[in-house]
Amino acid sequence: MLDLPLKFKKLLSVPDKISQVALLGNSTKSYNFLKFVNQISSNITIVRGEFDNGHLPSTKKDKVSESSRNLEEIPMNSIIRQGALKIGCCSGYTVVPKNDPLSLLALARQLDVDVLLWGGTHNVEAYTLEGKFFVNPGSCTGAFNTDWPIVFDVEDSDEAVTSEVEKTPKESGARQEDDSVEGASETDVANGNELKAESQFKEDEVNISDLDVNGSNSPSFCLLDIQGTTCTLYIYLYVDGEVKVDKVVYEKE
């Protein structure tokens, strides 16, 4: 399984700067990854992906059999409260049709959240629709996506950062699956994720809509800086060995 880019690890390892991590599915198979995420913040929200088990894995030190102890179940959806915002978390495989904006909107209404974080596609997306903010942090390891490129109509959305799902330089190769952050996604942290951004995370800005569409994925994660009713999203992409940053601001109506 591929690891996070070293520059991502350095950015995320700044002590006491990230208040919470959201993992959006398919992030519980690697003990080392979970250990790294726990070093970022002890406040972690995890939702279940299609390749996750129903319960959190035991640590290497925990040798007690699963039948004799209480396992923590991984929920399908979770809600985080930050400032005046309610943030929903889910893995994209529960959304039908997959990645469909109207289906995501229906889920956001069902959960009664202002912001919906979802994973499962390994591709960065961020847009507003009917007053709600939708964020897919992609994959912090650059997991390969076997799906065909998906393009949806964003005419009804208030703001679209990306409409294509495949965004990576032509030189990039296939990646193994490890959705985060998730990032954000991961943590997305990482694939993964709900995190607090600080000024020292900023590097060169890039328009992610300018990246090539070719069937593989750039490693990415997102940071959310929430102040009252304002959410500032920082999108981090690892492109040609460098970290590029895009910024989107959402204000709750």
Image (spheres, helix red, strand yellow):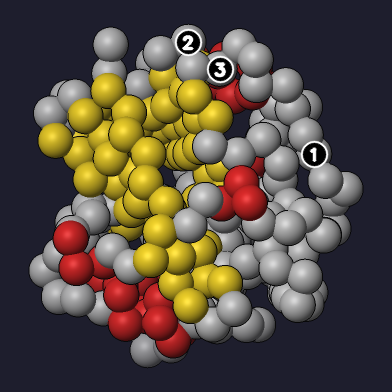
Q: Position of residue 180 (x, y in %)?
A: 52, 60
CA–CA distance between discs 1 and 3? Answer: 17 Å
Does dot 2 land on a helix, a strand or a loop?
loop
CA–CA distance between discs 1 and 2? Answer: 21 Å
Q: Residues within 10 Å of mark 2 (few under 14, many from 20)?
A: few
Residue designated by label 1: 150
CA–CA distance between discs 2 and 3? Answer: 7 Å
Q: Position of residue 222 (x, y in %)?
A: 41, 54
Residue designated by label 3: 157
Among numbered discs 2 and 3, the one appearing first in the sequence: 2
Does dot 1 land on a helix, a strand or a loop?
loop
- Place residue 143 in its image quadrant: bottom right
Residue designated by label 2: 130
**Residue 130: in sight, yes or no?**
yes
- Place residue 53 in its image quadrant: bottom right
The residue located at (26%, 35%) in the rendering is: 231
Q: Position of residue 157 (x, y in %)?
A: 56, 17
Vertical order, 125 against 32 (above or below):
above
